[in-house]
Image: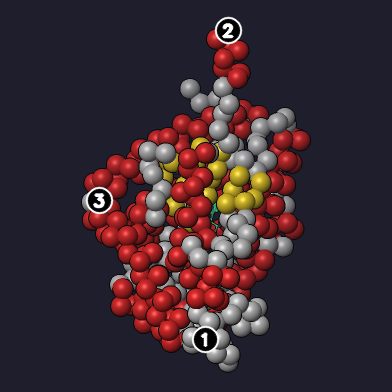
Amino acid sequence: MAMENQANEQKKPVILSGMQPTNDLMLGNMIGALRNWVVFQQQYECYFCVVDLHALTVRQVPAELRRRSLDVAATYIAGGVDPKQAAIFIQSHVSEHAELTWVLNTFAGMGECSRMTQFKDKSSQHSDNVNVGLFTYPILMAADILLYQANLVPVGEDQKQHLELTRNVAERFNFHYSPTFTIPEPFIPQSGGRIMSLQEPTKKMSKSDPNAGATIFLIDSDDQIRNKIKRAVTDSGTTIQYDEARPGVSNLMEIYSITTGKTVADIERDFEGKGYADFKIAVADAVVEYVKPVRERYNEIRSDVPELTRILQEGAEKARSTARKTLRKVYKKVGLVERT
Ligand code: TRP
């Protein structure tokens, strides 16, 4: 009877995702990712990490990396991720990530890693430091995912190729030994997930955009937000209508839609006969209202470092207890002598 109960008890599917602590988080991270994480945490077993080891593939200022890692963790919580429901942790606190990476490196081909577009982009952006870590970056990401036997991995479109590589490496390992890893599926939010730069609306809004006016950070003041929206690039038309040929106004409409819950049709109707000036004021008000509670929560959490440290320690412990099981299995299968 007890056994039957156990078998009937449905294990929640697992979700893992992470962000690099390379800059302050911005509106796009909230809309494209955090907003979904908050929903997932109720139905899935969730692991959300700050991928500080990934950040090392580009030269960092040590004190800044340390500060930013805590900033990002605090932003997860400020955005609504609940440490009681999801494990929130710093990747380097769970050493199994680095350890599994080593084994998975031996299951990834030079050819397939060379084909990664992010590797090609980053090696041309940082041509003075094309290090081996940059090359094996997606294998560390595979380890993040496979350690927790994740079923679903919410990522942006740009990470789809890395997830495909993760699946290939996992399948290869499973085939060579025996089923060990769950094969993860990408979860890529459809429309409504992508908001664009305020200065170049054909480019994704990015936390590392050198043009400060292009990105709304979650810790921007109300005035900063209003100014950025006011200066946002618009198109030659004058009407408030969604049109792919007019990416500037369409992006502002998308932002307005997400931050107010209004549909594009509602917005077009509400702003019929009105121009950019009126619309931008409305968008600015909506974004200010959307960001304000996140910023306030952030300031509260970030200023209580002992509490934040405690949350991250608890998250790491929870993560480690899952990660350890997978790593032990892997070490055994490949033939390493068991640690006693
Ligand atoms: N490479 C991802 C990015 O740049 C970040 C990341 C690292 C990640 N490990 C992950 C995302 C595991 C999802 C799952 O966006």
Which residue is labeled 2 in the image? 1
Q: Earlier in the sequence, mark 3 or mark 1?
A: 1
Q: Earlier in the sequence, mark 1 or mark 2?
A: 2
**In the image, ligand 1 is in what quadrant?**
bottom right
Q: Residue at x 62, y 40 (%)?
A: 151
Three-letter amino acid code at the position of disc 2:
Met
Q: How is the image coloured?
A: secondary structure
Image quadrant occupied by the N terminus: top right
Three-letter amino acid code at the position of disc 3:
Val
Tell me the distance, in whole angstroms, between the alpha carbons under discs 1 and 2: 69 Å
Q: Earlier in the sequence, mark 3 or mark 2?
A: 2
User: Is 248 placed above or below 238 here?
Assistant: above
Q: Nearer the viewer, mark 3 or mark 1?
A: 1
Residue 294 in sight here: yes
Residue 168 vs residue 95, the one in the foreground: 168
What secondary structure is marked by label 1? loop
User: Is 261 placed above or below 46 here?
Assistant: below
Binning the other alpha carbons within 10 Å of mark 1 as few (below 14), some (14 to 19) or many (20 upward) gives: few
Q: Which mark is residue 305?
A: 3
Residue 200 in sight here: no
Which x, y percent locates residue 47?
A: 48, 43
Q: Residue at x 30, y 78 (%)?
A: 223
Tell me the distance, in whole angstroms, between the alpha carbons under discs 3 and 2: 47 Å
Which residue is labeled 1 in the image? 273
